[in-house]
Amino acid sequence: MLIDSHCHIFLEEFDEDREEIVRNALEVGIEQMLLPNIDSSSLNPLLKTIEQYPEICTPMLGLHPTSVKGDYVAELSRIESVFSQCTPCAVGEIGIDLHWNRTYFPEQKDAFLAQLQWSVELNLPVSIHIRDAFKETIDIIEQFPLKEELRGVFHCFSGDKEDLEWVKRNPNFYIGVNGNITYKHAPLNREMLQGFPASRIIVETDCPYLAPIPYRGKRNQPAYLLYTANFLANLLGIEKKEDAYALFTENTKRLFRIEEH
């Protein structure tokens, strides 16, 4: 049994076959899926999916950094109003993304700080999206007045050894590993993972993106999580797949306090 700790099956890419996608996941042992929000436009599809699969899908609520524009305050307000309509397991996905440009970096920073505050007030973990901005993100977290009360995951971890060392030194934070770990030039490798606590690693698909080999380039889905979990188990030196699955599942439940939802 596994939990897909980060997937977007509420997006339009799955509108034609969502039922089949969920069935595929259940058939291979994916017992639960955690669904991070993107912005106000994704709220209705997210809530409908949660309503359709209440025993399987659990929402996160947040504003994705690439959706942060000049109107971010209104966007945050719309998203915040939905917390009373569901039981989210996290604030997410949130963070800093400077891959394309830095135009909205000040707004991204303000939005990130506001949502870190949500997480503290609601006692929820954060799912953090970072792209070409690890230093900037860490600086924001380090300067956050209530840093010690934060906990969360660096979703789709793509930092370097120094970044991973920072995560290691901060026990309230985990790393999320997805299909890109199976790629030839993966951001994580066996050497980097040596010495990192296996108890703070969780697995995810980020579907429909980042499908693992042998499906790279195709639409990803939660059922493909097994390819990532198996590959990661090998990197960690865990011989029995069942032991690896149990580890990743327990880590996910601990971080998101899933049994409480």
Image: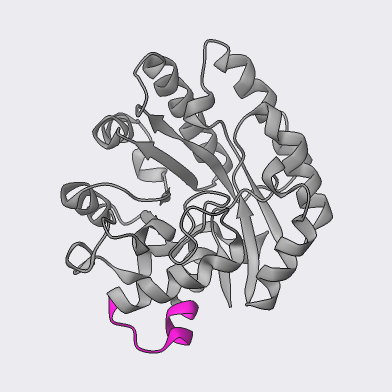
Q: Residue 259: which quarter of the image? A: bottom right
Residue 90: percent from left, percent from top: 56, 47
Q: How many numbered marks are there? A: 0
**Any part of residue 177 in sight:** no
Q: Residue, x 37% and y 54% (percent of image)? A: 172
**Any part of residue 35 in sight:** yes
Q: What's the magenta bit mostly, secondary-structure-wise?
A: helix
Give the residue furthest to the bottom: 240
Q: Residue 39: which quarter of the image? A: top right
Is residue 214 inside the magenta stretch? Answer: no
As displayed, is residue 56 above or below residue 162?
Answer: below
195 left or right, relative to 180:
left
Give the magenta range: 236-246
Residue 147: percent from left, percent from top: 35, 39
Q: Residue 92: which quarter of the image? A: top right
Taking depth in this image into account, of 153 and 239 the one nearest to the observer is 239
Taking depth in this image into account, of 211 and 189 the one nearest to the observer is 211
